[in-house]
Each structure stands twice: as structure tokens, then as C-alpha cells.
Amino acid sequence: MSMAKDIGSIEDDLLDEDDEDTQKNRYFTFQVGEEEYGLEIMHVIEVIGMQKITEVPDMPDFVKGVINLRGQVIPVMDVRTRFKMSPREYDDRTCIVVINIKDTAIGMVVDKVSDVIDIPEDQVDPPPKISRSAGSRFIKGMGKADDKVKILLDAGKLLYDEELEQVTSTID
Amino acid sequence: MSDMSNIIDENILSFITESREMIEEVEPHLIELSKTSSPGSSPDPETTNLIFRLFHSIKGTAGFLQFNEVVKVTHEAETLLDLIRSGKVEMDRRNTDVLCRTCDIVNSFLNQIESTGSDTGFEAEAKAIIGELSDCIHSKPGEKTKKKKASPPTPPKQPPPKETTAAEPTIEMGAEPSDALAQLLLTPEMLERFVEEAVEQLEVVEESMLKLQEEPDNQETIQEAFRSLHSFKGNCGFSGYADLEKLAHKTETLMDNLKEGHIKADASTIQTMLHMVDVFNQAIADISKGGPGSIQNSSVLLDLLEDIIPAQTTTKPAAPIVRPEIQQSEALFLLREKTELPVKEESSGQNKADIPETSANRSRSIARQDIRVNLAKLDQLINLVGELVIAEAMVTRNPDLKGYEFENFERSSTHLNKIVRDLQDITLSVRMIPVSGVFRKMIRLVHDLSVKAHKKVNLELLGEETEIDKTVSELIADPLVHLVRNAIDHGLESPQERLAQGKDETGEVILEAKHEGGEIWISIKDDGRGLDRQKILNKAIEKGLLKDDGSHLEDSQVYDFIFHPGFSTADKVTDVSGRGVGMDVVKRNIEKIKGHIDIRSQPGFGTVIALRIPLTLAIIDGMLVRVGKARYTVPLLSIRESIQVEKDKITITMDGQELVKVREELVPIIRLHELHHIETDRRELVGGLVVIVEYRGESAALLIDEIIGEQQAVIKGLSNYVGSVKGLSGCTILGDGEISLILDIGGLVKKAQSLAAA
């Protein structure tokens, strides 16, 4: 599989992923900063281009606001901000990956989408034990594919880690 | 469960309903035909054709669903009608009789199919009627041999009693006749809803019981289980499943004892409760498959429960003693009503035999007015239309077109735009349904309750056509049942009492729905005895909800106590009400849709309970305003006016709060851009535009950049992930696909105040 796939063909891949079995060990990969990250394919619904985001007050900084996805209002999270990386201007490669966790759809702004790849379980290492920041809590494992390392993310933690709860509780 | 079996169930259900409707339609026509056709003249071809078609439709559907007995019978009837139609056989008394009896047989089949899912069991009857039909087919015109099995001369009265007898083979319990009727009146949708709700309610009970096992003293858990069970009982009663209702009532009594601490939530009690839940679940499963939902050896279960319930409790005597006679009289009453009720439900509202033509025609036109659609599909449609609106904007305002002028393109795009808008309006209105569906459910309830409580009640429905969102209608159904129950059970006095007070013997209950200032008001009004302020206060003090005598409290504050869980001023608990659960359900459901409940009551003259439900679930009229790049929708109803701020009208307090003087009033200014931390075009107050908004007597002036215009906004939630944000009631999608946040003025004012306090 080539690395630089366009969104269309990745969407085709997504459409094929209906079957539970074929979803196993498949990862949707994208780039943020220098590294490649992977999300289990079962969570990913679709990839859309950058859209106008409507800001919502009183949100944590990584929740950029909401977008209109065909009549459905979904929140958008900036993965860079979530990882506490320095912000970067959105360009024409910036994409919103729409994922679904526990029946909630949410968009994630990533620098660039890469591919859909298979990483067998025996090629996944546990997250590093030593970490420099709290950001490592989103890591589910380190996947190895073609001499490269993809950081596999825990989508649930990405969305629902304690931080958001703290913020919402201060709003009420 | 496969989808296939669901589809078949659905098909059978609609087959049964449709066939019943058709038969009801056929009968008056048959009578009419026999009356109008004189010997020698051919019968009215149009009417004959109509009857022919109806039998034909039943045959067709029955064939598809493989109810072969039905097919055989209807086929013969069809053949006879064909001959009558072509004038080969005359429409005489005998033929009418036979055809009427054919209808009866088909009705029996339908009952049988409804309860067992198959049309077997009536082969003998079917054979007999087929024989008679073919006799008629082969007899010559004018030949009038009276059959020895001649039916009474008034066939229209005939079918209903026969229905009962026909249903008898499936009857297992004494109370079933009323069930059969109730189930007749139950549309498939209602049945579906009943089953859905029941499953949910039972789940809650089960969960609570399991939780109780861990922490036996958790009152909250008991309350929750109790509430669910109570609603379940109510639904059972309403849907006519008397067995279930009886058993649920008993279980509820047990739960009540649990709540009051008369018995302990030990392993065996919980086990019994769980067992009951299983029994209920089985019955519900049976019902969902079209079965009668009867419970085997329910009397054993009743006894079992009886044993556990301690004898000294006050709740016990009331139920079992009252029950049997009510059962009986109710069943009798319902039997008597049987002939009339189904006709009424058809909303022809008249005796069919008298004016067969009009009523039949009308019921036909009513039947064809709507179709059933899966709600998920509908939401999908709405979303697609939303997408279309955006796509349209993307095409017609495509940046590539900038600088060009295409006359034809402009014209076409205007056209397209108009169509898309219309389409959007229509699709959005589809979700709105008239409140009459919920209201109509009450007719039966009131009828049953008035029998049970031995009170005469006249129910009036006003504003049935008022449209409410489907979700709202689902959520108010339960509260309405409780409120109506309360109104009749507690509100209205007995006929004797009423007469003694110089009131009409018959009590009035008025259900009304109307739009009132951006809210939907659904009110239940009775002309009964009214709420007893002192009694409520006493009870509140007894329950420890009130420290003093409460004399300083406003009436409305006093009335609020009745929403407290477990609060009831009823002296005795009946199976209708008195346990103090109902109002708790009402409050919770109404709060779910951000509604308010207003109670007004005058001792001796009655009570009005108004559910004020905001339209915010559906559509609001809003004013679109711009602040920087953000566009907000301000509910039009909370806007008083908008003004340009002049320099001499501004006052700034020492803490920096800006006030603007509007006529004689000083209104605090809220700078939206500061509150929401966004960029704005205008920081200068003088010359700026403020919108004066008001919420419950509190005013505020919102500083904005520009007013864009008025528009209707469809309210959407801000995703679960975001949760509720203070000062926002949701968002809406604008015509160009962008999202506009809808301001919640009440919350906004409060938020500004709390920021000021901090």
C-alpha cells in the first residue's frame, strides 16, 4: 500500500470495513507533527476536509467548537492542542477525522491522513514506561509496520480523559 | 432476532387492523344493499364493487401471509359477490345474512391470528360458511329458502357479540373479555409502544433489585423501582392486560412495604421481585408476538405475594377487597359498550347502521390520510435535506462564479433555492405531530377510571390539533396519564358529594393544548374539590419536609410538595393512585424537556395543572445577530427591543459594570464578546447596538455588532460530548450550512451575574 493515499481511496477502504473480523488489527493512520498515529479502524467513520468551525464558549482549549456534518452537529477536537503541541496554521492537507465512540461522533483535526494498515498484535509493543508528559496516557501501544513506528491511540481516553470532566464541572 | 420475523409480525399486525377496518366498513354497506335492492332490480353497482374490493383485499393479503382458511372463506364470498355484481344472483335477505356471517367468521379468524399467530381452529365454522356461500352461489335468483340457522334480523348488531364468543377459545382468565376489547382498540403502534416501554420499565426494576441486593437500604433505588413498576402497572391497565395489571399492583404493594420498611430487602424478597420481573417479561414477550399476554397460574403468584406482604399494613385491605367487584362490573360495562366503542374510535362518531354511507366514506378518507414511517428514516431524511441546503448554497454561491454575471444561471438558482427552502420547511414539519394522539389515549383511560372510581366524568379535549414534536409527545404521555388519574381519583368528588355541593353530578375534566408565548401549554383542568392546602402542609410537616407550619408559604410553593416522591395526601391507596409516585413521574418527565408545571387550585372549584413545555425542542423564532465572526440566534420571545446606545444613557458603576438607561429602567449590559471570549468589531459602547432581552422579569442588554434578521431556527443539541453550556440552549444550522449558537437568555443572565459576583 502506498503511503500517500488520497482521502477518496481511504474512504473506500473505510466502506469495506463493515465486517468485524476484517476490522481487527486494522488501523487508520494519520500524521500530527513528525509522527504517525494510528486509531482502530472500527472507530473511524469518515474523513472530511477542513470546515468552518463554530466556536463554543467555555470549552477546554482542545475542543475547537462544532461543525455541521450533513445536518448533524458534532464537536471538533484539535489533536495538536490535545497533545499540547504548538499550534499550526490549518492548510489544505489538514483534515477532520470523524470517529465514533460510545455513540458519540466527534471530529479530530489532524495534520494529514496517511493510510489504513494492518498491524498484527505481535507487532504492537506496550506504551513506553517512561514518559515526559501526561500526553502519553493516550497511547495504547506502539505499532511496528515496515520499519516504522505508529503510535496507536486509545480513542476513549483521547475523548474522555479526566481533563474535560474537570472543565465541564467548573461550568456548571 | 432476525429482521425478517419483525417484518412479518408488522405485516400481520397491519393485516389485522386493516382487515378489521374493512369489515367494519363492509357491514353497513351490506345492510344498505339489502335494503335498497328490490327483487328484480340489480343492486347498486358501486356499493357492490366496494364490498367486492374489500373482500378481495383481505383475500390478497391473507394469501400473502398464508392464512389459507381466511383465503378460502373470502374467496367464496368474492365469488358470490361477483355473481351479485353481474346480476346473476340477487342481493336478497339470505345472501346478506350469509355475507354478514362471513364477516363474523373473518373477524374470528383475525382474533385467532392476533392471539396465536395462525388461523387454524375454526375449520368447522369455515367449512359451514363456505357451504352456505356456495349454496347461495348455486341458487337461482329469487329463490328464497330460509335457512334454519337464520341469524337475527338485525345483522349490524350481530358481529360484536359473536366476536366475543369467537374469542372465547383463547380465553384463559376471567377478566379477559375486557382485554379483548382493549386489544381491539389498541393500534399496532400503541402496542409497540406499550411493549417498548414495558421492557424499559422492567429493566429498571430489575436493575434496581440487583442493586438493592448490594445495598439493601438505598431508598433512592427502591423509589426508582417503584416508579417504574407504577408506570408499568398503569400501562398494563390502560392497554387492557388485566392479569398483568393485577399482578403488577400486588408487586407494587410489596414494593411499597419494602419502601416503608415493613419488610426487609433480604435475599428472598429480592428473589421474589426478580421472579415477578421474569414473569412480566415473559408476558410482555408474548404480547409482542401478538399473544394475549396472559399469565399462567397468576393466582398462585398472587397468593405467593400475598404471603410475603405483612398483614398489618394499611395498603393491603384496600386493594384486594375493592378489586373483584370492580373487575366484574367493569367487564360487564365494557361488554355493553362493545358494540359502540370500536365505531367511535373510527371517529365516524355515529351509528353506522343509521347512516352507513357517510360514516363509511369518512372513515375511508381518514384511513388513507397518513402512512407509517420509521422515525430513523425520517431523521435521515431531515439530515439529507440539511445537506441539500448546504450543497445548494455551495453551488449557487460558488466562489468560481465570482465576478461573472449569468442571467439564466441566476434565474435557475433562485428557482432551486426556493424549492430547497420549501422542501426544508416541509421536512421539518413532518416531525411535528398533533397532540391528539396522546389526548385520544385519555378517552379510554377516563372511561375506565370513571367506572373504577364510580364517578361520572365528562372529558373534553381542546386544541387537539396543536402540533408538538414527536419526542415531546412521547414524554408527556406518561405524565398525562398520571395527571388524569389524579384528577379523577382525587380531584373529582363522588356524584353524591357533588350533588350535595350543588354541582353537576358529572364531573368535568378538560384537557387542553395550546401555544402560549413560545411555549406549549398542556393543561388538565377538573372541577373537583381542589387541592387542600392544609392537608398538604400537614403531610409535608409529617414527612419532615417542612420545619414550621408553612403559613408564610405561597400557594404555589405549597403545591410543589405534591411532586415530592412518596408524597400523597390520599387516605387510602387504590390501584389507581394514592402512593405518591405519579406526580414524581410527571415532574421528572417534564423536567427532561425543560418544562415547568403550574398548579392553580381553588378549594371547591377545581384544579388546573398546566404543563408548560418550551418549544425549544422543535423550532423557535429567532433573531440572528452578529458579534465579530460569530452569529448568534436570540429567541425572539425574550427580545424586548433593540436600541442604539447614546452616550448620556450610559452609567458605569465603580466595579466596571455598564448600565444603559432604557426609559426609566437601568439595564445591565452584557458584552457577549467578553462573555464568550471572541473577537468583535466594536468595543466602543457609545453608538453600539444593544438588544434588550428579558427573562422572568430580569432584563439585560446584549452588546452586538449587527442584527442580521429574523428567522426560524430548528434547535439542535450541542452533542453529548460538549454537554450543556450555560447560556446556550443549543444551536441551529443556518441556510449557508454554518452553525449559529442559540442563546439561552435565562442562563446568560445568570452566568453574567455569577461572573460579576466572583
Image (cartoon, rainbow, N blue to C red):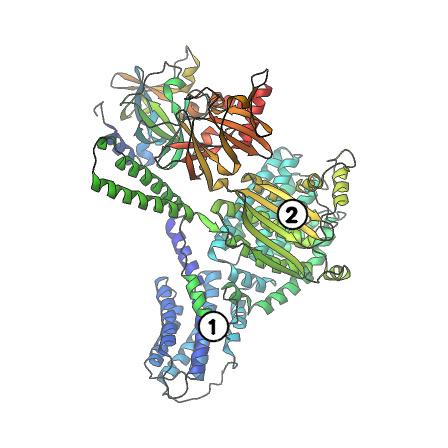
Chain on which label 2 sits: B
Quadrant of the rendered structure where residue B623 is?
A: top left
Tell me the residue at 46%/87% (across/down).
B146
Where residue B264 appears, as percent x and y from the top left, is: 69, 39
Q: State the SS at label 1.
A: helix
| Neighbour tally class for label 2: few under 14, some 14-19, many 20 plus, Cα within 10 Å | many
Where residue B209 appears, as percent x and y from the top left, is: 60, 39
Kind of residue at disc 2: Glu
Quadrant of the rendered structure where residue A84 is?
A: top left
Sequence order check, earlier mark of 1 and 2: 1
Q: Can you identify the residue that label 1 sits on?
A: B104
The reply to whether dot 1 and dot 2 touch (C-beta < 8 Å) is no
Q: Is residue A119 left or right of residue B8?
A: left
| Residue B306 sits above or below residue B63 on the image | above
| Mark identifier at residue B252 | 2
| Residue B595 sits above or below residue A84 on the image | below
Q: State the SS at label 2.
A: helix
In the foreground, A131 or B377:
B377
| Mark identifier at residue B496 | none
In the foreground, B344 or A145:
B344
Where residue B574 appears, as percent x and y from the top left, is: 69, 53
**Co-location on one chain, circles 1 and 2:** yes
Q: State whether residue B692 appears in this view.
A: yes
Q: Give the Cα separation between the discs numbered 1 and 2.
A: 40 Å
Where residue B400 appears, as percent x and y from the top left, is: 22, 31
Chain on which label 1 sits: B
| Residue B531 sits above or below residue B753 on the image | below
Q: State whether residue B122 appears in this view.
A: no
